Amino acid sequence: AYIDGELNGRDELMLEMHLAHCSTCASALNEQKKLLCFLDSAMLEKNEIDVPTNFAKIVVANAQGRVSGLRQPGERFRALFVCSGLFFLVLLGLGNETQAVVKTFIIFSEQLFAVGGFVWHFVYDFAFGMAIILRSLSSQFLFNSSTSFAFVIVLFLISLAFLSRLVLRFSRV
């Protein structure tokens, strides 16, 4: 902040008084000033580099070519192996605290599974109940009226047409 001139007058005066008595801080400040002067002089020199017109395409092609290792089948296994090794080293680094940390993780995972099980059962029971209600309503609606039955058949045929069109558009052959 002192070099950039961001200090207020009182703080700047206190720092200058400290620099007058402390040679270590004064030499560190001088080193930083020299570094800033060097950087300023280096930035002033214009080193123009001629870049080819298709430079961006070349960089993208090289970047895509170097990512091929990430697409290999064994890459996930190696990443999992490295992560498990690092986890094991962390456990070794904990020493006597390992049991407490592992116990905390086990309790946390049990609570997480309990909450997940509750949410799963709630969603399943809700969907099952809605299916029963909709089934009874739809049977009354569909089979007691010929117009509604024809409407559902037409809607089903339209949805089949759109689905087949969607599948044909995105088929990967």
Image: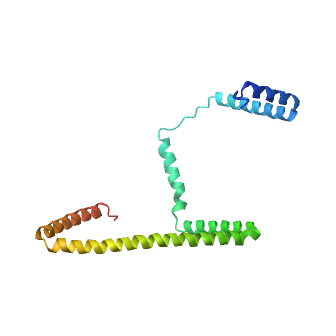
Q: In front: 100, or 78?
A: 100
Location of residue 173 in the rendering, given as x and y in whole percent from the top left corner: 34, 65
Quarter of the image holding residue 13?
top right
Left or right: residue 162 versus residue 118 is: left
* Figure label count: 0
Location of residue 158 in the rendering, given as x and y in whole percent from the top left corner: 20, 63
Q: Which residue corresponds to the image point at 81% horizontal and 35% vertical from the top-left?
A: 28
Left or right: residue 96 versus residue 130 is: right
Quarter of the image holding residue 111?
bottom right
Location of residue 119 in the rendering, given as x and y in whole percent from the top left corner: 46, 69
Q: Which residue corresponds to the image point at 14% horizontal and 73% vertical from the top-left?
A: 144
Q: In front: 62, or 16?
A: 16
Q: Which residue corresponds to the image point at 13% horizontal and 68% vertical from the top-left?
A: 150
- Residue, far left: 146
Is residue 4 depicted above or below 67 in this figure? above
Quarter holding the N terminus is: top right
Is residue 32 depicted above or below 100 in this figure? above
Give the image's coloring scheme: rainbow
Is residue 66 depicted above or below 147 in this figure? above
Q: Which residue corresponds to the image point at 55% horizontal and 61% vertical from the top-left?
A: 69
Location of residue 30 in the rendering, given as x and y in whole percent from the top left corner: 80, 30
